[in-house]
Image (cartoon, grey):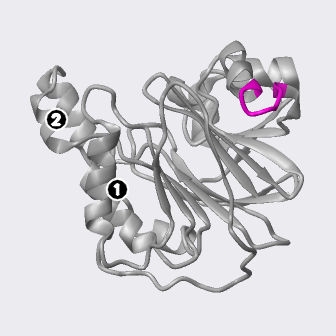
Amino acid sequence: MRVWVLGSGSRGNAVLIECAGTRLLVDCGFSPRALAGRLAAIGFAPSDVHAVVLTHEHQDHAKGAAAGAARFGWRVHATEGTLRALGAVPNAESFPAGATVAVGHAVVETVRVPHDAAQPVAVVVSDPAGGARCGVAFDLGHVPAAMLPCFRDLDVLVLEANHDPDLLAAGPYPPSVRARIASRVGHLSNPEAARAIRAFAHRGLRHVVLAHLSETSNAPAVALATVRGVLEGSRFRGALHAAPPDGPIGPFAPVRTRVGAPAQFELGLFA
């Protein structure tokens, strides 16, 4: 398994996961032209992508899905609610939120998350032969308890760390927007993301990538410092990264193949 974050932020989000001979995108929030440029930077073309899995319908996550499906023949997988909200999408296949589906040779587990979208999910992509697992959770107002069993024993975690509470409060957004971002159906703050990572952490978690950082209410150095502080003394022994909005980062890969060793979670952190 190899994982690249092709860009993450309010201007667009996409993660490329290469798993058991299948290459899939988790979200496609860039135009086909912009996505082609980001793929070319890591040695791929859009035709090398087999499928897209969408977490929800907001344009910074789904803008290029329909056009990419029409142009490149991608199969698009999303919840029934997400596809209804998007309208006509070629080559689309729906699944119930919380379902586990096969996408090529990869297995995709989904879990419903709280966000102000039609039927949003977080996903875990796994290699059924080698056991490698990558979790991607972009937009969520808080981390629900249902994510604990789904996000077990990960090798790579891509998790939203959208805003610093103080920077959000002092920032340029009107009060209604600040309230929406900080709500339980908005976006994760740096401290909330840090507590989630600590709960998901185990000694086999090799990479954590902080994603969807706000360019007005956050900064990579702030997010990384907050998360590192909370992770002190935890089981996490991997590397911590912050995804930039304007280009790819990666690849991230498991150091070794691990099959079926369950992680020991820190409980009591989620509502």
User: Which residue is drawn at the image coordinates 81% and 26% (left, top)?
Assistant: 46
Which residue is at the front of the view, 103 or 24? 24
Label 2: element kind: helix
Query: In which image quadrant can residue 261 be found?
Result: bottom right
Q: Amino acid at mark 1?
A: Ala
Q: Does residue 271 appear in the picture of this structure? A: no
**115 left or right, relative to 261:** left
Q: Nearer the viewer, residue 245 or 179?
A: 245
Q: Position of residue 249 (x, y in %)?
A: 59, 39
Tell me which label, 1 or 2, sits earlier in the chain: 2
Instruction: Tell me the quarter of the image containing the C terminus.
Output: bottom left
Q: Residue at 34% across / 50% down in the picture?
A: 224
Q: What residue would you read off at disc 1?
A: 193
Which label belongs to residue 167? 2
**Tag shown at residue 228:** none
Q: Secondary structure at mark 1?
A: helix
The magenta-colored residue range is 40-46
Specify the amino acid type for callout 2.
Leu
Residue 19 on image: x %, y %: 80, 55
The N terminus lies in quadrant: bottom right
User: Which SS type dominates the magenta stretch?
Assistant: loop
Is 39 on the left or on the right of 116, as rendered? right
Q: Position of residue 243 (x, y in %)?
A: 49, 40
Is 107 included in the stretch rendered in magenta?
no
Instruction: Judge the density around disc 2: few (<14), some (14-19), many (≥20) Cα neighbours within 10 Å.
Output: some
